[in-house]
Image (tube, grey):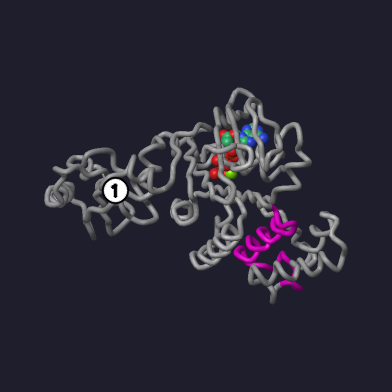
Amino acid sequence: MNQGIQTSHAVVAEGLGKQYGEQWALRDFQLAVPTGSVLGLLGHNGAGKTTAIRILTTLVAPTTGTAKVAGHDVVAEPDRVREQIGLTSQAATVDGLMTGAANLEMIGRLYHLPRKVAQARAAELLAELRLEDAGDRLVKDYSGGMRRRLDLAASLVASPPVLFLDEPTTGLDPESRNELWDLLRQLVGGGTTLILTTQYLEEADQLADDVVLLDHGKIVATGSPEQLKARYGGERVVVTVAADDELGAAAEALEKVAAGTAEIDREGLFVAAPASESTRLIEVVRALEEGGVDAHDVRRREATLDDVFFSLTSPRARVASTHATKDSDREEATA
Ligand SMILES: Nc1ncnc2c1ncn2[C@@H]1O[C@H](COP(=O)(O)OP(=O)(O)OP(=O)(O)O)[C@@H](O)[C@H]1O
Ligand SMILES: [Mg+2]
């Protein structure tokens, strides 16, 4: 890790910041991504993930700080950086009114590949991304998962050594997500450096060698998923309830006996809180009964990356994030 930061690191950033009006979308952002590794950028909506990706891919200039990708400065040598990177942005970039094959071929031509070579590369990528049967269909008729795979194929046309993926699996069903993870593992096995943002912490846990956790534009934690779990995790008590409207009461009851604040997972219908040595499940069950909560399941388990995430990002951030989502949606809609 310490030998020659230029050659051993595909991406290095120092004190990066981006200000929009009064607001800092990103602040004091540091990064050193070893060549051939996977970095996961995590954060709620509006945390600054896309801003970091945009700066590193030369799409916006930083207000402060410097960054190098594949040894080239993103501000001073944007063209050299672009030769070395692939980008799949959060919004789909492929043209819906062209076929999948035509999209990839066009991108190959933009990279100055001869037509034959561009066609061959398109066919090769369609096969790799299991889209060979869909290559001749218009992209507007693709499913979300197919479109995401084509987006990824588009970023791979020039075989870039450094790949940036902004929420590559958002909106995919679990099966498509697993398929894409396998593909990404293959790419990384071939030496590609991967920087990906995700809202799915399991994705980071599965793929990332290192994780950077962003909250309101600032880094709040970095380390491997294992390190983060060990450092900020510990054991949890998890209470699963029968229905959504029980979650509030379950959280309240759990907090009476647990060692910290309870986090609510509405999708999973459970609440989780840190447990200490002295936290006893029988007391949790009693508190739930007293609170009139219909609990399906009460258990202890080791912390996950989700727990780390929730304990390091404030509940207020989650309320504020509703607005941030709208902002970034608006921005993408008009981009
Ligand atoms: N072009 C812009 N003009 C003004 N504000 C912006 C612009 N781009 C981003 N922001 C603001 O900067 C903050 C960070 O946005 P960013 O898109 O980087 O977040 P994100 O982590 O990618 O969020 P999401 O998960 O919703 O994609 C947000 O508050 C957003 O509204
Ligand atoms: Mg984003």
Q: Which residues are magenta?
A: 135-160
Residue 266 x/y as whole percent: 37, 52
Q: Residue 110 versus residue 49: which sits nearer the camera? A: 110
Q: Main secondary structure of the magenta part?
A: helix
Name the amino acid type tagged 1: Ala
Residue 43 % position (x, y): 49, 42
Circle 1 is placed at which residue position? 272
**Furthest-bottom residue in this view:** 133
Depth check, front residue: 50 or 326:
50
Determine the residue positioned at 57% across, 60% down. 189
Tell how many labels: 1
Q: Is residue 97 visible?
A: no
- For the C terminus, the image quarter is top right
- Please state if 250 lies on the left or on the right of 290 as rendered: right
Q: Residue at x 80, y 63 (%)?
A: 105
Q: Is 274 on the left or on the right of 214, as rendered? A: left
Mark 1 Cα within 10 Å, few/some/many (few <14, many 20+)?
A: many
Q: Is residue 72 left or right of residue 175?
A: right
Residue at the spot x=53%, y=32% of the render? 217
Instruction: Indicate the secondary structure of the residue bearing disc 1.
Output: strand
Image quadrant, ligand 1: top right
Furthest residue to the front?
Answer: 3
**Where does the image place residue 162, in percent across and percent down from the top left?**
65, 49
Confirm whether residue 209 shows in the render: yes
Give the residue at x 76% y 59%: 95
Looking at the image, residue 301 lies above or below residue 314 = below
Q: Is residue 198 left or right of residue 11?
A: left
